[in-house]
Image (cartoon, rainbow, N blue to C red):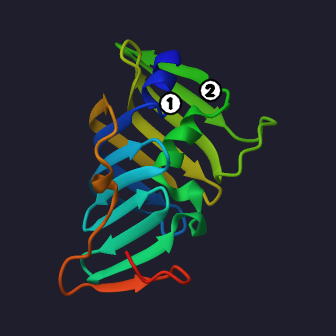
Amino acid sequence: MLQVRKNYGGAGAVTAAFDLNIYWSVRERDEKKSGELLVAPGNRFKVTLGREVFVSDGRTYWQYNERNKQVIVRNFSDIDPTTLPSQMLSSFLSNRKFMEKGRSGETVELEWKGGSGERFDDGYTSITAVIEETGGVIRTLALTDKNDNVHTYTFKRTAFDRPPKDDVFRFTAPRGVEVMDMREGDASN
């Protein structure tokens, strides 16, 4: 667990390609997507998920939907931080007490269940992670929310580097795309 915290602890950047399976409990169906994730210190991130892109430079948040040809721009402080990729990893790394659920080859499966006296306000009731023991790399991360929806990330490749240049964490709308700037008093993006 120490190597995992060191790898994902926020001192450098984490880049990963992943498959995401979302089980929607109310609809009793699965939704599958693939994406790429770049997370850096200071709530900076860029996530490509299918035909959507989510970008933050720590002050401004852009959400681009290619299908709708629309970009929504918000102040970072106005969005729910529990839904962010930077929070997803830090949620795993927080002070939760994980129990070992099993081992298989070079991996260990860890699990945290809510209700054990620990209070976290990120909405998760359980988290399961499959980790490469020697390298401290998360292979699978399953997050169950209070509505019993399960978001399972399967990481295909992960790299730990220095944060890239700041322009990676800014978004410029393509031509012909509607920009909805939700920031008060600031029309720039």
Q: Which mark is residue 55?
A: none
Choose between 27 and 2: the one closer to the eye.
Answer: 2
Q: Is residue 52 left or right of residue 110?
A: left
Residue located 55% across and 23% down the image: 101
Q: Is residue 123 left or right of residue 5?
A: right
As displayed, is residue 17 above or below residue 110?
below
Query: How far across and down, in percent of the image, does residue 126 sit?
Result: 61, 42
Q: Nearer the viewer, mark 1 or mark 2?
A: 1
Q: Residue furthest toward the left?
A: 175
Question: Of marks 1 and 2, which one's residue comes earlier in the chain?
Answer: 1
Q: Quadrant of residue 181?
A: bottom left
Q: Residues within 10 Å of mark 1 (few under 14, many from 20)?
A: some
The quarter of the image holding the C terminus is bottom left
Choose between 99 and 91: the one closer to the eye.
Answer: 91
Give the residue number, with chain letter if any, for mark 1: 9
Secondary structure beneath label 1:
loop
- What's under tag 2, amino acid-wise? Phe
Query: How far across and down, in percent of the image, does residue 174 sit?
Result: 20, 77
Residue located 49% across and 46% down the image: 42
Query: How far across and down, in percent of the image, does residue 154 sit?
Result: 34, 41
Secondary structure beneath label 2:
loop
Residue located 30% across and 66% down the image: 171
- What's under tag 1, amino acid-wise? Gly
Is residue 109 in sight in this rendering?
no
Give the residue number, with chain letter if any, for mark 2: 98
Query: How far across and down, in percent of the image, does residue 92 sit?
Result: 55, 36
Q: Residues within 10 Å of mark 2 (few under 14, many from 20)?
A: some
Q: Residue furthest toward the right?
A: 117
As displayed, is residue 61 above or below residue 58?
below
Mark 1 and mark 2 residues within 8 Å of each other at the beta carbon: no
